[in-house]
Image (cartoon, rainbow, N blue to C red):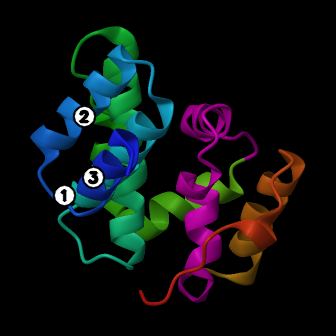
């Protein structure tokens, strides 16, 4: 078993954000993109306090992913204050709906696609949890992803929520 395979196994079973963050940094320092990506994806999956498999959990994974990337790029902790304020006012579902039907995609949508993480976009969340949204919102989300070249049939599906 290679060291990378061993570390990937440890990451898969880890729920400690500090340890995952350390693995991300170390993997980037050692030019191990598979390890860095695995640790990053695991980190954003364990940070939300909401129940896994719910639209709310998926939403907060996206927010944590975007904030983590921005923080790394800027060299300082960055929070999406306006998004967090909107969620406090209208909730996760309404925020996702507004993103999907907006004439223009969000900066987060573009950033996530550039980093090969289409499953974390708000539009992908809408598709995973289609029964929580109107047909118009689901169609708008699908269209935005397809216009960006994403095959929506290959995106993960939700089992609950």
Q: Secondary structure at mark 3?
A: helix
Q: Secondary structure at mark 2?
A: helix
Q: Tell which circle, 3 or 2, labels the residue nearer the N-terminal end.
A: 3
Look at the image and give the residue range highlighted in magenta: 103-132
Q: Residue at x 73, y 39 (%)?
A: 104
Whether residue 80 is in magenta: the answer is no
**Res 130 quadrant in image:** bottom right
* Marking on residue 24: none
Residue 82 in the image: above or below residue 16? above
Q: Is residue 88 visible?
A: no
Separation of residues labelled 1 and 2 (CA atoms):
11 Å
Q: Looking at the figure, which quarter contains the C terminus?
A: bottom left
What predominant SS class does the magenta segment belong to? helix
Give left or right: position of 151 versus 8: right
Q: Is residue 120 magenta?
A: yes
* Residue pointed to by mark 1: 14
Q: Which residue is mark 2?
A: 23
Answer few, some or many: residues within 10 Å of disc 1's Cα (few below 14, many 20 plus, some between 14 and 19): some
Q: Earlier in the sequence, mark 1 or mark 2?
A: 1
State if disc 1 and disc 3 touch (CB < 8 Å): yes
Of residue 98 and residue 17, the one placed in the foreground of this image is 17
Q: Which residue is mark 3?
A: 11
Q: Residue furthest front?
A: 1
Rounded to the nearest whole Å, what is the CA distance between mark 3 and mark 2?
8 Å
Residue drawn at 86 percent across, 56 percent down = 146
Left or right: residue 128 compared with residue 25: right
Residue 53: % across, % down:
38, 79
- Label 3–label 2 contact, CB within 8 A: yes
Binning the other alpha carbons within 10 Å of mark 2 as few (below 14), some (14 to 19) or many (20 upward) gives many
């Amino acid at each position: 078993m290679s060291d990378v395979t061993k570390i990937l196994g440890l990451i898969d079973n880890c729920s400690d954000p500090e340890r995952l963050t350390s693995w991300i940094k170390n993997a980037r320092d050692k030019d191990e993109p598979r390890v860095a990506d695995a640790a990053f994806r695991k980190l954003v999956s364990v940070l939300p306090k909401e129940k896994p498999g719910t639209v709310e959990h998926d939403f907060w994974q996206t927010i944590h992913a975007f904030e983590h990337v921005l923080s790394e790029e800027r060299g300082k902790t960055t929070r999406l204050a306006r998004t967090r304020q909107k969620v406090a006012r209208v909730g996760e579902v309404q925020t996702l709906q507004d993103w999907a039907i907006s004439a223009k995609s969000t900066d987060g949508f573009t950033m996530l696609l550039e980093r090969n993480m289409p499953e974390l976009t708000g539009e992908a969340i809408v598709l995973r949890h289609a029964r929580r949204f109107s047909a118009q919102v689901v169609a708008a989300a699908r269209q935005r992803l397809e216009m960006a070249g994403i095959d929506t049939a290959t995106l993960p599906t939700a089992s609950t929520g």
